[in-house]
Image: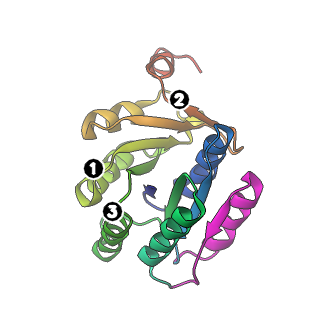
Amino acid sequence: VIVFVGVNGTGKTTTIAKIAKYLTDNGFTVLLACSDTFRAGALEQLEMHAKRVGVKVIKHRYGADPAAVAYDAIASARARGIDVVLVDTAGRMQTDRGLMDELRKIVRVSQPDLVVFVGDALAGNDALEQAKKFEEAVGIDAVVLTKVDADARGGAAVSIAHAIGKPIIFLGCGQRYEDLIPFTREWLVDRIMGGS
């Protein structure tokens, strides 16, 4: 079970679809949980991605308890023998106490193997502060940075990894499902030294 967290607009849902494709391409079975029961269009967006990458989705209606969706998805995956559940959560500002409490409940109920923070490489110091707050609230195990194709030097990667001491596991570098690359130190050094 992997729960994805972060603020609005970082590309969490698209990143989840990319990771679902990556996992299925590597022989794993995947189920998506739509625990974003708040944002208009969230259910439809995740369903569209799931259909395109060939995985199933567990969802409830808008306004439903997001933790209940995660719980049902995990139970369904166990019953079906599915390897991995990817839980999409609503984007939330790290300063919104009520939404952070909701996120804590999702994590408590789902007991994930990983909590992954999805951050926007273009957000700079904001992404760093967001990562710190999510780390304090729910504990982050790893980071995915999105929009690195538009980040000239990769500074967000250095800042976040250093500040919270968690590994960056993937980089989102475009809109296609294939535009997800494993993070390497070589990529970072190349960026810092002015490569592309």
- Earlier along the polypeptide chain: callout 2 or callout 1? 1
- Earlier along the polypeptide chain: callout 1 or callout 3? 3
Q: Quadrant of residue 156?
A: top left
Q: Which amino acid does label 2 sit on?
A: Ala
Q: Confirm or deny contact between disc 1 and disc 3 (CB under 8 A).
A: no
100 displayed left or right of 6: left
72 up-or-down from 173: above or below: below
**Which label belongs to residue 92?**
none
Q: What element carries label 1?
A: helix
Q: What residue type is labelled 1?
A: Lys
Q: Which stretch is magenta? A: 38-63
| Number of marks in the rendered image | 3
Whether the magenta-drawn stretch holds residue 50 is answered as yes
Which residue lies at the image location 55% right of the left edge and 74% below the top edge? 39
Residue occupied by mark 3? 94
> Badge 3: few (under 14), some or many (20 or more) residues near its Cα, within 10 Å?
some
**Which label belongs to residue 132?**
1
34 displayed left or right of 41: left
Q: What element carries label 2?
A: loop
